[in-house]
């Protein structure tokens, strides 16, 4: 019985590797800008070449080039997604971090408490309709919800909200100057 090998002969594969590896590294390096990553991509392209049962034939250099370019681009995409996930997680936890830091700082706690008192007092001095509008908006209501709650047109919300915010700012400044 004769054993038949489906893997390419090692000498022809070695020759293909020696000939194409520097080119694949150069392709990946142009995309990635990092030599170590480019070398990894080139090696992974050869591993994929062997795993798919391809033979060192005239079309092999083209296939390897495309495989290296795809792997390099996929690596960039993967890193971009990871960075986006980490940034989103950071943004999600940043307020918690600030709160934790502020909770440890007695002066920050005092400043926050004083600011809350000033803002609440300023809200009480506003026209009831303005205070209501601000409370609803900063409580998370959308413009449509504000319009429904106050019985006014949605297009008027932006203007009224801006006026109410200016009035609140004026009241806060007035209170802090006393």
Image: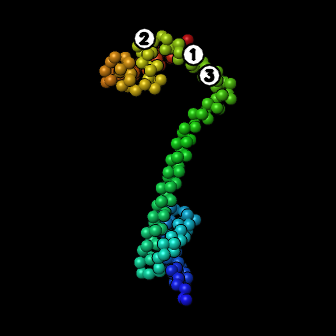
Q: Is residue 52 above or below residue 127?
A: below
Q: Check the image and tell me how it is coloured.
A: rainbow
Tell me which residue sits at (45%, 64%) in the image.
Answer: 70
Q: Is residue 72 above or below residue 114?
A: below
Mark with earlier residue (2, 1): 1
Callout 3: 10 Å neighbours few (<14), some, many (20+)?
Answer: few
In depth, the one of 3 and 61 nearer the eye is: 3
* Quadrant showing the N terminus: bottom right
Left/right placement of residue 161 relative to residue 121 reads left
Callout 1: 10 Å neighbours few (<14), some, many (20+)?
Answer: few
Residue 89 is situated, as x and y percent measured from the top left of the image, at 55, 42
Residue bearing mark 2: 127
Secondary structure beneath label 3: helix
Mark with earlier residue (3, 2): 3
Residue bearing mark 1: 117
In the current view of this chain or complex, which residue is farthest to the front?
1
Q: Are marks 2 and 1 in contact (CB under 8 Å)?
A: no
Tell me which residue sits at (48%, 68%) in the image.
Answer: 68
Secondary structure beneath label 2: loop
Residue bearing mark 3: 111
Tell me which residue sits at (52%, 46%) in the image.
Answer: 85
Tell me which residue sits at (51%, 80%) in the image.
Answer: 6
Residue 40 is situated, as x and y percent measured from the top left of the image, at 56, 66
Mark nearest the camera among 3 and 1 is 1
Left/right placement of residue 107 relative to residue 175 reads right
């Amino acid at each position: 019985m004769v054993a038949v090998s489906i893997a390419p002969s090692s000498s022809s594969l070695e020759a293909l590797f020696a000939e194409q590896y520097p080119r694949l590294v150069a392709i990946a390096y142009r995309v990635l800008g990092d030599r170590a990553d480019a070398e990894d991509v080139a090696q992974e392209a050869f591993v994929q070449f062997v795993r798919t049962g391809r033979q060192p034939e005239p079309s092999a250099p083209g296939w390897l080039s495309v495989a290296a370019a795809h792997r390099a681009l996929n690596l960039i995409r993967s890193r971009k997604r990871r960075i986006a996930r980490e940034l989103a997680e950071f943004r999600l936890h940043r307020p918690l971090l600030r709160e934790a830091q502020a909770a440890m700082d007695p002066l920050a706690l005092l400043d926050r408490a004083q600011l809350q008192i000033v803002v609440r007092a300023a809200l009480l001095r506003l026209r009831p309709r303005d205070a209501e509008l601000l409370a609803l908006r900063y409580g998370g209501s959308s413009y449509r919800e504000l319009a429904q709650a106050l019985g006014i047109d949605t297009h008027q919300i932006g203007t009224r909200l801006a006026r109410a915010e200016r009035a609140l700012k004026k009241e806060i400044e007035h209170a802090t100057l006393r």
